[in-house]
Image (cartoon, rainbow, N blue to C red):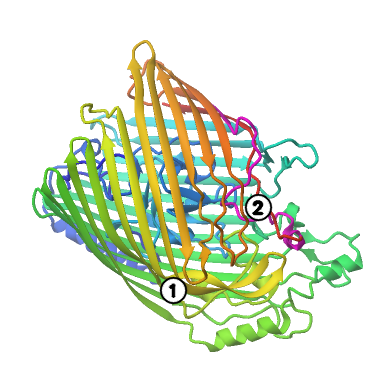
């Protein structure tokens, strides 16, 4: 974690480190709401006295939080998963789901408890299994910046979350340096991985003058099922891991306009996922198209900085079963009558699978101002609105007696509106001591329409009378809910000595339930098991009367570093933390559905989490002959407890560490890395979470850069990266990978329930990058 720089008021230039709050909107919300907000900002801009615009490169990066880890250049990764950008952040892990859709975890808090921002937009998932979370909507190849903040987050970084914030963004528009010149630049890369036949390509092209900029970027990623570590001999545990293939495409066009001290940028992006398999879900993603329009304004004035953002997103999402789980489409003509009866099919030719569709729209605006009160004090003010509209329906399966004859409506015209306002005060009381205090209010308003099962006739339908009764009870209930939430943050930073920095603080964070925690209503085995982003095979049922969860986090950081060297030849950081959560949204058991599989109902509990994060690095040598050698280490430990059920919290990463040695000399660089993970023994007994053994992994890598006459400070013309992951081909289970459901519901009938998901074995990875 980089140290906190001495606090400075916001300069009269474009801020490079700001973290905008995000908002949403839908077809139920008039488009004029967004336009009105942008019109108001424009009116203020026209009447304000402009200040001289400083070049973007001269603006210092703002340190926001005691636990923040920001990269002005996103870390290099050879993975198609965007969460891999945060692999060196203490306290960060990920729930492993599909090949490109892992869910972020910060200090044991996961999924919706972590606020995820993409290009300044707070986006949610439009799927009952969260197959399309925010970080899955972009390719890591196209990201230029990334940051992660665990636990204590500034109120300006958004509300409606308790675990922290992660943010990724594309590079801002580039402009020519001189008025009479035209900038033409671009970059590209190609990837290949031996395990799973992984391949990918990405690139971008920019044409710009000193005032106008236009950039196109695109990315492609593909993989077949990967192979687990260990021998492929029978009983040795190796071989193909089913339901791990994927294919994705990303495209974006960004236009920028710079005039004086004003910058406008506008991005249109689209993602297409023809298919993505999920080993820990009963369903797979068979089509997903996400379209996003995002407009942003930044203006610099004598009094500070003004920002405005408006965005709109549309997600069309489809799920069904790919081949490993039985496939979908016309059933084989040779299927026996017994097999057809088990599948709920009539005697005639019928369809396989179970289609599940969703249509989501999000839109909103974000307005914020950073005001310099003096040379040592800054106030940040902001207001934002987010709207999320969702329809989730399951079409009838032709010829099926269980899934028909009508359409199942899980979420019918659901809406979730979030209005947030904040004020934040930063003060530098002395060269060595600074504070931050902030408050925010969040109003979350939710509602949904009437629902329906496949049929109102219990004969033959899956779930029968139980789902019919549940639908009638749900329709008769009052479904509108409004939560008034309050957040606060207090932080202090003190440079005690030239080699010791202390940071500490407290934060109160609040999160309201998502659509499915409140509104999932089906109670039958089939219906409930279609809901759940936990990858455990259990069935989930919502609770209308859930209360928002409130987390109080205390954190303290000690940072030691070399006091004599400007490049810090060594530094070490230790951070203990404690979080107590009131009304934590967890689950109660209501029925047993099979071996190790239960129907669970969301409920408010009491919970707590505590742990320790540490990191350090040291420069071992630096000389013209030997180049540079550096050693770094990261350690994370968390323990989460459900105090109501006397159970561990679900999917807590066991004690783990990463030790990395890097050497560079001229155009060459190489690294060796060891990953150590302790056995996971503390689990959630309510979900019958499986335990996993510990493991150790070894990885090697090297790269070579061709500058072709360029200065060494500029990006190389070409760069080749080679790595060997899991060099010893260790066989191990993913601690946060859930259960292996690639065999469909039939795989849950084993004596002990489905096993954990096996991780990828040895893989040789090649990447070629170019820049012009």
The one of 493 and 484 positioned closer to us in this rendering: 493
Residue 84 percent coordinates (x, y)? 49, 43
Residue 475 percent coordinates (x, y)? 56, 86
Residue 756 numbered mark, or none: 2
Residue 763 falls in image quadrant: top right
Which secondary structure lies at badge 1? loop
Residue 545 percent coordinates (x, y)? 47, 80
Determine if the magenta segment contains residue 739: yes
Q: Residue furthest bottom?
A: 476
Circle 2 packing at 10 Å, graded few (<14), some (14-19), many (20+), is: many
Q: Residue at x 39, y 44 (%)?
A: 170
**Apparent side of residue 264 relative to residue 272 in the rendered image (left or right):** left
Residue 672 percent coordinates (x, y)? 50, 27
Q: Residue furthest left?
A: 374
Most common SS among magenta residues: loop
Residue 724 numbered mark, or none: none
Judge whether residue 260 can be spotted in this image.
no
Magenta segment boundaries in residue numbering: 722-750
Residue under label 1: 28
Judge whether residue 387 can be spotted in this image.
yes
Residue 481 falls in image quadrant: bottom left
Quadrant of the snapshot with the C terminus: top left
**Apparent side of residue 393 relative to residue 9 in the rendered image (left or right):** right
Q: Residue at x 63, y 43 (%)?
A: 732
The one of 127 and 204 positioned closer to us in this rendering: 127
Which secondary structure lies at badge 2? loop
The one of 68 and 177 positioned closer to us in this rendering: 68
Q: Residue furthest top?
A: 625
């Amino acid at each position: 974690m980089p140290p906190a720089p001495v606090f400075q008021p916001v300069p009269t230039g474009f801020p490079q480190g700001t973290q905008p709050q995000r908002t949403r909107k839908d077809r139920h919300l008039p488009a004029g709401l967004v336009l009105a907000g942008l019109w108001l900002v424009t009116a203020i801009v026209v009447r304000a006295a402009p200040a001289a615009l400083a070049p973007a490169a001269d603006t210092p990066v703002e340190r926001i939080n005691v636990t923040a880890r920001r990269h002005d250049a996103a870390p290099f990764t050879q993975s198609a998963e965007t969460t891999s950008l945060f692999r060196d952040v203490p306290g960060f892990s990920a729930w492993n789901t599909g090949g490109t859709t892992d869910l972020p975890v910060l200090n044991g808090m996961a999924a919706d408890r972590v606020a995820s921002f993409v290009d300044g937009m707070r986006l949610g998932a439009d799927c009952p299994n969260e197959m399309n979370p925010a970080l899955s909507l972009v390719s890591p190849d196209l990201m230029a910046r990334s940051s992660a903040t665990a636990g204590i987050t500034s109120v300006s970084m958004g509300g409606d979350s308790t675990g922290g914030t992660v943010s990724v963004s594309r590079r801002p528009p580039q402009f020519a340096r001189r008025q009479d010149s035209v900038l033409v630049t671009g970059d590209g890369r190609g990837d290949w991985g031996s395990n799973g036949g992984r391949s990918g390509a990405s690139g971008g092209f920019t044409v710009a003058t000193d005032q106008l900029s236009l950039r196109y970027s695109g990315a492609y990623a593909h993989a077949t099922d990967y192979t687990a570590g260990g021998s492929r001999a029978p009983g040795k545990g190796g071989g193909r891991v089913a339901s791990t293939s994927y294919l994705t495409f990303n495209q974006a066009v960004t236009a920028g306009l710079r005039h004086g001290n004003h910058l406008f940028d506008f991005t249109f992006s689209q993602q297409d996922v023809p298919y993505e398999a999920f080993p820990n879900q009963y369903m797979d993603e068979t089509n997903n198209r996400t379209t996003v329009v995002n407009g942003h304004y930044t203006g610099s004035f004598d009094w500070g900085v003004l920002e405005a953002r408006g965005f709109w997103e549309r997600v069309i999402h489809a799920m069904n079963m790919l081949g490993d789980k039985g496939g979908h489409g016309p059933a084989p003509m040779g299927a026996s009558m017994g097999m057809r009866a088990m599948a709920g099919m009539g005697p005639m030719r019928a369809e396989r699978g179970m289609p599940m569709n969703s249509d989501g729209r999000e839109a909103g605006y974000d307005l914020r101002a950073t005001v310099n009160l003096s040379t040592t004090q800054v106030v940040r003010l902001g207001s934002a609105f987010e709207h999320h509209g969702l329809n989730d329906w399951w079409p009838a399966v032709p010829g099926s007696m269980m899934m028909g004859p009508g359409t199942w409506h899980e979420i019918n015209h659901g809406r979730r509106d979030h209005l947030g306002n904040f004020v934040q005060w930063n003060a530098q009381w002395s060269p060595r001591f600074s504070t931050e205090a902030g408050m925010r209010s969040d109003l979350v308003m939710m509602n949904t329409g009437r629902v329906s099962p496949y049929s109102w006739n219990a004969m033959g339908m899956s779930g029968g009378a139980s789902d019919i009764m549940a639908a009638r009870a749900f329709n008769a209930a009052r479904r509108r809910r409004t939560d008034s939430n309050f957040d606060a943050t207090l932080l202090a930073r003190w440079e005690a000595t030239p080699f010791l920095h202390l940071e500490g603080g407290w934060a109160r964070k609040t999160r309201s339930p998502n659509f499915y925690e409140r509104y999932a209503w089906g109670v039958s085995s089939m219906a409930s098991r279609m809901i759940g982003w936990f990858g455990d095979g259990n069935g989930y049922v919502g609770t209308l009367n859930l209360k928002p969860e409130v987390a109080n986090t205390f954190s303290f950081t000690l940072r030691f570093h070399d006091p004599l060297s400007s490049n810090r030849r060594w530094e070490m950081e230790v951070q203990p933390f404690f979080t107590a959560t009131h009304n934590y949204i967890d689950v109660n058991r209501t029925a047993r559905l099979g071996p190790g599989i239960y129907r669970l109902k969301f409920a408010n509990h009491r919970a707590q989490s505590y742990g320790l994060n540490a990191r350090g690095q040291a420069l071992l040598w630096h000389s013209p002959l030997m180049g540079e050698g550096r050693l770094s280490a990261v350690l994370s430990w968390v323990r989460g407890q459900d105090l109501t059920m006397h159970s561990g919290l679900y999917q807590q990463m066991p004690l783990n560490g990463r030790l990395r040695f890097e050497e560079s000399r001229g155009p060459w660089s190489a690294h060796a890395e060891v990953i150590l993970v302790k056995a996971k023994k503390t689990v959630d007994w309510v979900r019958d979470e499986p335990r996993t053994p510990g493991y150790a992994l070894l990885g090697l890598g090297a790269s070579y850069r061709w500058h072709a006459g360029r200065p060494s400070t500029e990006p190389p013309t070409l760069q080749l990266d080679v790595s060997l992951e899991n060099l010893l081909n260790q066989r191990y289970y993913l601690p946060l990978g859930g259960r292996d459901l690639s065999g469909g519901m039939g795989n849950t009938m084993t004596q002990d329930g489905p096993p954990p998901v096996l991780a990828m074995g040895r893989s040789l990875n090649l990447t070629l990058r170019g820049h012009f």
